[in-house]
Amino acid sequence: MNVADQELIKNVSPLELNKSNAYNIRKNGKSIVRNITDDVSIISKEDGSGIDIYIKENTKNALVFIPVIVTKSGLHDKVYNDFHIGKNAKATIMAGCAIRNNQNLDASHNGIHRFYLDEGAKIKYIEKHYAEGHGRGHKNLDPVTELYLGKNASLEMDTVQISGVDSSTRVTKGTLGDGATLLISEKIMTENKQQATTKFDINLDGKDASCHVVSRSVAKDNSDQLFISKINGNNKCYGHVECDAILQDNGHVQAIPEVDAKNIDARLIHEASIGKIAGEQLIKLMSLGLSATEAENQIINGFLK
């Protein structure tokens, strides 16, 4: 990695590359740096399409970093990463992709991540997306996340996309067992003519399984966003989806909820709120000496925290 690569990675993941943490850095379709620990193994797939990450049972507070960077215009990178989390293991996994495209061909990354959590496993998964570049080529990101949570397992998923991505489609699918918990926080900002689509499809199969999804988004200029969520309550369970969006200029956001209860004790809730920044919020901040633009930016930054 050169200095420019390191600066690009910092937009999606801290560079804590020490021997106590497990990591794998992928650049332009190839793994370039890797470290494993006593508790975390990272193994390349035999066909070269990605990696398998194994976290041993009863592991405590492991840190795993798997950032991706794309700096080659015209490259369409696709990778399959499978996470195998042992019984009662606890870990934080930081992923994400940063694209720098200074040329005129489109560049993209499609990461397919599959999580298999054994009983009692607890994972925090952080995924950030970022793009930059002065070329005419687009920067596209299309992540797919599949989640399989065993008995009493829990996964907290935090995703962020707030700069530079021309087009993205994020697909998240989940299947939850007895007592499993899934918490998802999504933050998206689009501007210019950017497009972003998010699709959630969660199956609450286990007794007392629960899912809570919160999406916060801002659509500026002529950008377009589509939010689709489907929660399937197949047992005694609880599911809650909250979608809040702010519109500026000619921004467009469409939210399509679907809840499907197949059990009398399934409790499913969907809430959506879309609108412009409230005038009283702007007036209050401008009375403190902020310009209209400064006031808007402060409101948006607070909204996306």
Image: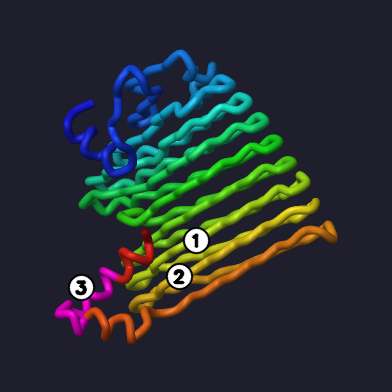
Q: Which residues are the magenta region?
A: 286-298
Percent x, y of residue 196: 45, 59
Reading the chain from its start, which is encountered first: label 1 or label 2?
Answer: 1
- SS at badge 3: helix
Q: Nearer the viewer, residue 62 or 254?
A: 62
Image quadrant where one finds the N terminus: top left
Q: Residue furthest left?
A: 289
The secondary structure making up most of the magenta span is helix
Q: Circle 2 is placed at which residue position?
A: 245
Answer with mark 1 or mark 3, whichever residue precedes in sequence. 1
Which residue is tagged 3? Answer: 294
Front-lying residue, 96 or 178: 178
Q: Is residue 289 magenta?
A: yes
Q: Residues within 10 Å of mark 3 (few under 14, many from 20)?
A: some
Q: Which residue is mark 1?
A: 215
Residue at disc 1, secondary structure: strand
Residue at coordinates 20% horizontally, 73% vertically from top-left?
A: 294
Q: Position of residue 28 (x, y in %)?
A: 34, 31
From this view, report whether residue 60 is shown above or below residue 302.
above
Q: Earlier in the sequence, mark 2 or mark 3?
A: 2
